[in-house]
Amino acid sequence: MSIFRNVMSAGLATSMVGLSLVATAPAAQARDHFWGGVAAGAVGGIIGGALINEARRPAYAYPVYEAPPPPPPVYRTYYRPVYVPACHYEWRHNEWGDGYRVQVCPR
């Protein structure tokens, strides 16, 4: 609650108690009914404060939803292309040991 609402609620409760004391205590009577008026004012203030607070409360409670669980990690499968070269060169040696390159192609 904000400070403004707290101050307003306290002021309203105080004024309810004060007004109930003034309203229940008659002016020029010499009887000892002071504490009866205080009790009536306190009960009236409590009941009035409860009614006002109930009126300020929303008529329904907002539903509380749990946070959804985090999604599972995504593992992507990467396929490496199979590289089959069409042809490649290799070194070969003749009968005298001289090297030469030959193009080799798979069948």
Image (cartoon, helix red, strand yellow):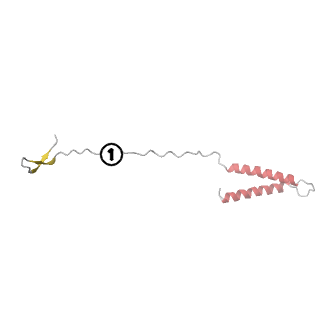
Could you tell me which residue is drawn at 73 percent across and 49 percent down?
51
Amino acid type of the residue tagged 1 in the rendering: Tyr
Could you tell me which residue is drawn at 86 percent across and 53 percent down?
35
Q: Does dot 1 land on a helix, a strand or a loop?
A: loop
Could you tell me which residue is drawn at 6 percent across and 49 percent down?
96
Picture layout, residue 72 above or below residue 32: above
Which of the two residues, 58 or 94, is positioned nearer the viewer here?
94
**x then y, percent, for residue 105:** 15, 44
Side of 27 where 97 appears, left or right: left
Side of 99 where 6 appears, left or right: right
**x then y, percent, for residue 86:** 18, 45
Which residue occupies the extreme front position in the image?
96
Which residue occupies the extreme right position in the image?
30
Identify the image quadrant of the C terminus: top left
Which residue occupies the extreme top position in the image?
107
The residue that label 1 is drawn on is: 78
Could you tell me which residue is drawn at 69 percent across and 49 percent down?
55
Tell me how many marks there are: 1
Side of 68 where 106 appears, left or right: left
Where on the picture, by quarter, is residue 10?
bottom right
**x then y, percent, for residue 15:** 77, 57
**x then y, percent, for residue 34:** 87, 55
Identify the image quadrant of the N terminus: bottom right
Which of the two residues, 98 or 14, is positioned nearer the viewer here?
98
